Amino acid sequence: MSENKSTIQTFISGILAICSLLIVLNLEFRIAVFADEQFVYDPKGRRSPFTPLVTPDGRLLKLDKEPGAVGLTLEGIIFDKRGVSYAIVNTEVVKIGDFVSGYQVLRIEKAKVVLIKEGEPLEIELKKEDE
């Protein structure tokens, strides 16, 4: 009876050791997989958190207001009057029908993009390089 009890204890100890090993290996695998994922910060129109707000001598820097009434910036246009045109708004490439910052792209022209939100159209003009 004592030998049978000892065998059962050894068997249970072995099972627990194997389960513990599997748990540790699984955690290490999850950590390794998580470490391989690359994180890309998407500012979504907000200022960079790495931009200082105060000068080295202690003066408060004046932040530029977001361009446009709603903080939308038209950065570029690829215009094709016979095909699909694209615009770059707040670093996102969009076409007619796409959404950006809650606005839907209604029309893309040579020098401006017309967006709409809640029935209100908004035109964003492309700035010239010298501006």
Image: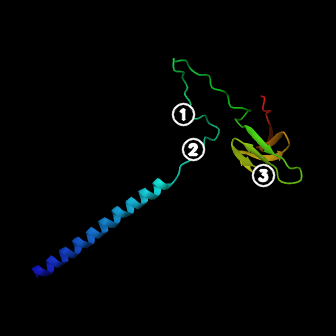
Dot 3 lies on which element?
A: loop
Q: Give whichever of discs 1 and 3 has the lower sequence position.
A: 1
Q: Whole-percent x and y of residue 94?
A: 74, 49
Residue 104 visible here: yes
Q: Quadrant of residue 89?
A: top right
In the orientation shown, which residue stands out farthest toward the left? 2
Residue 100 visible here: no
Pick the front one: 28 or 23: 28
Q: Give whichever of discs 2 and 3 has the lower sequence position.
A: 2
- Asked if disc 2 and disc 1 are in contact, CB closer than 8 Å, the reply is no
Q: Whole-percent x and y of residue 125?
A: 81, 36
**Residue at horizontal 14 percent and vertical 81 percent from the top:** 4
Tell me which amino acid carries mark 1.
Phe
Question: Disc 2 designates what residue?
Answer: 41
- Asked if disc 1 and disc 3 are in contact, CB closer than 8 Å, the reply is no
Tell me which amino acid carries mark 2.
Tyr
**Residue at horizontal 42 percent and vertical 56 percent from the top:** 31
For the residues labelled 2 and 1, the Cα–Cα distance comes to 12 Å
Question: Disc 1 designates what residue?
Answer: 50
Question: Disc 3 designates what residue?
Answer: 97
Dot 2 lies on which element?
A: loop
Nearest to viewer (mark 1 / mark 3): 1
Q: Quadrant of residue 44?
A: top right
For the residues labelled 1 and 3, the Cα–Cα distance comes to 34 Å
Q: Quadrant of the N terminus?
A: bottom left
